[in-house]
Amino acid sequence: MEQKGSPVALGTENVWRLLLQYAIPSVVAMTASSLYNIIDSIFIGQGVGALAISGLAITFPLMNLSAAFGSLVGVGASALMSLRLGQKDYSSANHILGNVFVLNLLLGIIYMIVVLLFLDPILYFFGASAETLPYAHDFMVVITLGNVITHMYFGLNALLRASGNPLKSMYATIFSVIINCILAPLFIFGLGWGIRGAALATIVAQAFMLTWQIRLFSDRNRFIHLRRGIFKLKRKIVLDSFSIGMAPFMMNAVASVIVIIINQGLIRYGGDLAVGAYGIVNRVATLFVMVVIGLNQGMQPIAGYNFGARQFDRVNSVLKLTILLATGVMMIGFLISEIFPRTVASLFANDQDLINLAAPGLRIVMATFPIVGFQMVTSNFFQSIGMAGKAIFMSLSRQVVFLLPLLLILPHIFGMKGVWYSIPAADLLSSIVAAFLLAAQYRKLSDKP
């Protein structure tokens, strides 16, 4: 008799049906999560003010850095778990669960202590001014105190997906968002806690769902569950997880540096409100990026399992389908941003100066979105099949090789618009690199029996 959450279907069922089964819950969850961030920003912009939006944008590098450490463990371990399940190595899969628990706890505590000790100097370095620092400080104190909860919540959610439970992973995210959307206006408006209320709503919602995740993984009837003997850190599991998770870690860590440079460029050429405009553009772009991330999360266990089981025809199929869907999603984002930029920007604030800065930025940044989905799927594909080196190279090529030099050069020529131009230019160049790498790998997979 098969245990709950058996992953065997990943290697036998129709690939299209599997991708829908795994991707739809992830897409729903990621979309819900991104919509919460948008709604939260709207609450902050409408209820606290335009400068609060700028203060929130100043925190993006720290949020990216926190996500980097979370993905180093969660994304790496979930990809590793899919590979081990495909290889029928169930003992290692259970030890991965225990190691994720311990690693998230350790990294979360270390990150919290370091950030809280140096928070204000960090925020000033990121581009905060005397006007925006109070908002950024109040938001990050609450978020950082709850960092361990956030890491644990996202790490266990990734393992739920990888161990054959995409619906439960979706439920965790959706209910977290629902709780968040109920608490945020209550804390911001009802209790008058302002931007701190928005941060607290996030942590409280994640804490509720983390408790539920732990209960799920404590069920002894489940295929993968918490048990004695799996919490001791194993060198191979830790190193393999870090190796696979290094690509998203590097992507998020370097993104932190990039956002700092973007913020500093926008402040120099446009002032504090220009940073707020970037905050709006970032939130809107993230909505569509998160949908593609959801598709990637649906692809990951299917590609990882079948690559581990050496069923390369199924690996090819799920890759093609995911690229097709991702391209369609990003095309929708492109059309909305090009046709209705002012309408979208006005959702976040009533300040006309802020809207005037955000609308053209939205059009420019999302100009290359029709090809960005392809680039994102390709990077995640290499990560899913354990080829960490290629995934890391793709991440660094966009951020370091292309975007960083463009951010240092174009603003001197075009002013504030040069900051906006740098982003789609880097996307275009990195997509060309992705096409070359994928073509080479695809030939290898097609040649295998």
Image (tube, helix red, strand yellow):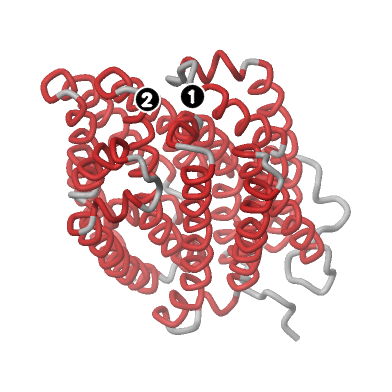
Cβ atoms under marks 1 and 2 closer than 8 Å: yes
Does residue 433 appear in the picture of this structure? no
Percent coordinates x, y for residue 351 in the rendering: 35, 40
Q: Amino acid at mark 1?
A: Thr
Please tell me which residue lies in front, 255 or 386: 255
The 10 Å Cα crowd at callout 1, few under 14, some 14 to 19, many 20 or more, is many
Please tell me which residue lies in front, 174 or 446: 174
Q: Quadrant of residue 396?
A: top left
Q: Quadrant of residue 73?
A: top right
Q: Amino acid at mark 2?
A: Asp
- Figure check: 430 above or below 173: above
Percent coordinates x, y for residue 19 in the rendering: 44, 74
Please give left or right for residue 123 compared with residue 3 in the image. left
Q: Which label sits on residue 132?
A: 1
Extreme residue in the left direction: 413
Q: Which residue is mark 2?
A: 272
